[in-house]
Every structure is written in C-alpha cells, then in structure tokens.
Image (cartoon, rainbow, N blue to C red):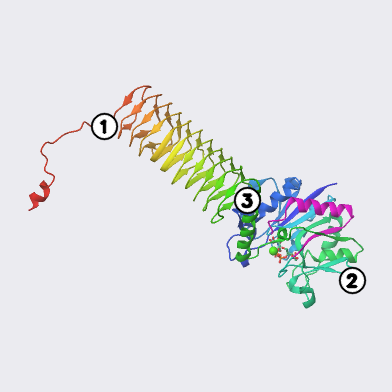
Amino acid sequence: MDYSAIILAAGDGKRMKSEKPKVMCEVLGEPMIGWVLDSVRDAGIPDERVGVIVGSGAKTVQEYIANKGTYRTFMQEERKGTGHAVMQAEEMLRDGGNVLILCGDAPFADSDTIIAALNEHTHNGNDVTVVSAELEDPAGYGRIIRGEDGAFRAITEAKDCTMPELQIQEINSGVYWFRADALAKALPKLGADNAAGEYYLTDTVALICEGGGKAGIYKAEDPDIVLGANNRAELLSLNITAKMAVIGKLLAEGVEFVSTDGIIIGKDVEIGADTKILPGTIIRGKTVIGTGCTIGPNTLIENCRIGSGVILNSVQAYDSRVCDRVKAGPFVQLRPGTILHDGVKIGDFVEIKNSEIGMNTAVAHLTYVGDSDVGKGVNFGCGCVTANYDGINKYRTKIGDHAFIGCNTNLIAPVEIGENAATAAGSTITKPVPPNSLAVERAQTKIIDNWDKNFLRKKKA
Ligand code: UD1
Ligand code: CA
C-alpha cells in the first residue's frame, strides 16, 4: 500500500502581524512547518512522497524545506481555503493508496498519533479518518458533528456553527488520513457557500458520508497534539507548552534543572544524565551534550557536540565540538569550526574560530585564536591575537605542543611556532619560530635617568 502526505502551508501570517509566512513562525527555534515535516518523516513517509502547498511567502518556505529534504511543492496562487489548497496537489492523489493531510501551523502532531490514526483508518476500512481531540476551550476549531447514532457525520467550522454546535468540545485537529480515490472524488464537489467563502477541506467528510463512504475518528490521547497557532499569543503558548514538554522528557532522562527560568531547549537536543542546565541557557539545533556537565548560566549552544564533565559558563558556541572535561567561560565565544580537545581551558573574553585546540591547552584571558592548529599543553598568556586576515585572504597559524605564547603576542599568519618554543610578551611574530627557542620582537628599553614626572606641569607654570 502506498502512503503519501500533503502539508498545507500556503496561508499568510495576517493574524501573526508578520512579514513572514505563518508556518515559518518558530516554536523552540524551529519553524512550525519543520516540526510537521519531522513528524511525517518519523512516521515513515519518504520525503519525495510529501507535497507541501505553498503560497504566501512561498520563496521563504521553499528555501527552508529544500534545506531539509527533497520535498515536492505545489503553488496555491490564491488562498481560497484548505480544500482549494489540496486541489493544487491533485496529481498526488492519482497514485491511489492513502494520503495523510496536515496543517503546517500545528506543530505538535506527532508520528505516534499519525501511525495510530493510520492503523485505525486501514483496520476499519475508512475512506477518511480524522484525528480529533477533546479540548477544554475549543474556540476557533472545527467541531466534530455526530449523528443521533453517535456516528461521525461532518466537521463544522467554528464560524458556521450554531449555538449548540459551539458547545461541542471534540474538535478537528486538521490531521486526516484519506483514501486517495475518495478524496479525489470529493474535492470537485466542494463549494464555498459558507461564512468564510472558502473551499473547506473539512466539507469532504460530509460529502464522503453522503456518497455512502465511511468516515471515522481517531481521538488523540494527548489533547496538546492538536494545538495550532494563528496569532502571537497562541505562538507564545505553543512555545511554553513545547518548552515544558522537552524539559519534562529530559528530567525523566536524568538531566538536572534547578529552575526553568530563561531555559529554551530545542526538540532534537540530546543531553546526558547528571548534566545540570542553569538559568538563561538556550540550546538548539542538532546538539548533543554528554553526562555530568554544567551548562550555563547564560549560555547559548547551537549545533554542537559536547563531551562529558564539561563546564560552560556564559559561553556562546556555534557548530563546534567540545571534548571531555573542557572548562570555558565566562564570556567566551566559540565560532563555527572550533574543536576543543579534552581538558582544554578557555577563560574570560576569549574568542576561538575555526581552530583546533589540543589537549590541556589553556587560553585563559582576552585572546583571539582564529584559523589555527594548536597542539597540546600550550599556554596562551593574556591578550594574544592571531592576525589571520590581511584584508584579502585568511591564513592559518600553527602552534606546536607545549609552546608558551607570551602575553600580548601578535601572531601574523601564516606563521608557525615550533614545539616547546616560546614568544616573549609583547612580541609581533612574523617568522617561523623553531622548536625549543624563544622569539623576542621588541625594541630595546631606553632608560632616561632622574625623570621628573611633573616636568610638563612645571614647564607650563
Ligand atoms: C483548520 C480547519 C479546522 C481545524 C483547524 C485545526 C478547515 C476549513 N478548518 O482551521 O477545522 O480545527 O484547522 O488547526 O480546514 N492554508 C492553505 N491555503 C489556504 C488556506 C489555508 O495552505 O487557502 C493552510 C494554512 O497555511 C494552514 C492550514 O492550511 O497551515 C490551516 O489553515 P487555517 O486558515 O489556519 O485554518 P483554521 O482556521 O485553523
Ligand atoms: Ca490554523
């Protein structure tokens, strides 16, 4: 049996008051459409069988999804409703099988629910199976309408509901499994005679029932999976829900939080047991952190691999690798391409970029290391700078094991410091320094005897 998916993502962000298309609004740092694409992939539907309906801000959405996988996209030039959106991908229905439809603005539809709903769908031989949920506050959602026998008959949009229908708390999540042929047959029959003047996808349920087809419901166990965001307040509430869900999962895995203040952790982040996350810490992207670390306070980590026993205090780290027992901070930036090997110490006001720093090396204060290969056991004094850029090109600096870089050394790349070599404080090094040698690059000190430090003031008087 063939499975495919269509994701509706053409709507604008009118109620978000945003220049961005709505589905690009972020929950825990990931656009909502990204969450939906991940769930569909986790449910086992291959990317090339997923069609995304784009329209408002199509270019932004297309760029983002092209980065994630090889998805098909369909253009909906005019937004005439969710049914009209699906019509744009009609060719996907020709292959038969079952098609999953989801909304790009409801990020919490998870793969377990998608699979459980499919099982229900195929087991009961349904033409359509709608994922529903029971909500305390169903305002704004389409309501599930059942006949006197309790059988599912239709979905009525909130705008079109009668007063008694508005009391119904079972709502349409916007996630559906359709038999492709049943959907293809219902779509051309849709009309736009409703409060919004739109072609509602939800009307296909009644059409299928009237045509003698079978409509079923899969009621989600967790009502949160249906939550969507149409405005900023709802987006904030999705972020709060998602934040606590991620933290809840990590707590169960042995991660320590003494407070959740200012902590935002992306859904794909992995953290080992006994690692403590302190307030003001944001961890996002594909980040993996080992066990027994202390991360924060006030730390931002994006797409990094962090080992175990690491301490990061007020660190910003991007696309970097940090090995075991590294200690960094406060006020450190690790820019993309940084590798810190075991036991490295990075102190205050240090920036490392695109550099490999060997085991147990110390860069303790006020230093910039860029485009460098640094050995193990090296010591940088305070205020060292690798001058890696001549205004046109970038060059590398190489520093051998156990070298000693004196305070305020400038290393003008390309340059190499040999093993066990040293540079004198204040030197500007432009030539290779051989192993076991000392490079001194400064003027001789000139001494003026009997200097009266007040002589200028006296001269004026
Ligand atoms: C829709 C459902 C409602 C359900 C709710 C769940 C319909 C008519 N209503 O309402 O029953 O309870 O989702 O969240 O389907 N879109 C397009 N093209 C369009 C219009 C919308 O691609 O012409 C996309 C939007 O980008 C969005 C999704 O479809 O991702 C849903 O549209 P939206 O306008 O948000 O529908 P709701 O009013 O939330
Ligand atoms: Ca919506």
Res. 422 image quadrant: top left
* 449 to the left or right of 208: left
What is the three-letter code of the residue carrying label 2? Answer: Glu
For label 3, the crowd category at 10 Å Cα-Cα, with few meaning under 14, some 14 to 19 and many 20 or more, is some
Residue occupied by mark 3: 64
Q: Say if 196 sits above or below 124 in the image.
A: below
Q: Nearer the viewer, mark 2 or mark 3?
A: 2
Label whose residue precedes the other's in the sequence (3 or 1): 3
Q: Which residue in the structure is indicated by mark 1? A: 442
Q: Amino acid at mark 3?
A: Tyr
Q: Which residue is mark 2?
A: 148
Mark 1 against mark 2, which lies toward the viewer?
2
Distance between the Cα atoms at labels 1 and 2? Answer: 95 Å
Instruction: Based on the picture, tell me whether residue 108 belongs to the magenta stretch.
Output: yes
Label whose residue precedes the other's in the sequence (1 or 2): 2
What amino acid is at disc 1? Arg
Q: Magenta stretch: give its range.
A: 106-134
Q: Is residue 365 magenta?
A: no
Q: Mark 2 touching mark 3, by CB under 8 A?
A: no
Q: CA distance from mark 2 to mark 3?
A: 46 Å
Callout 2: helix, strand or loop? Answer: loop
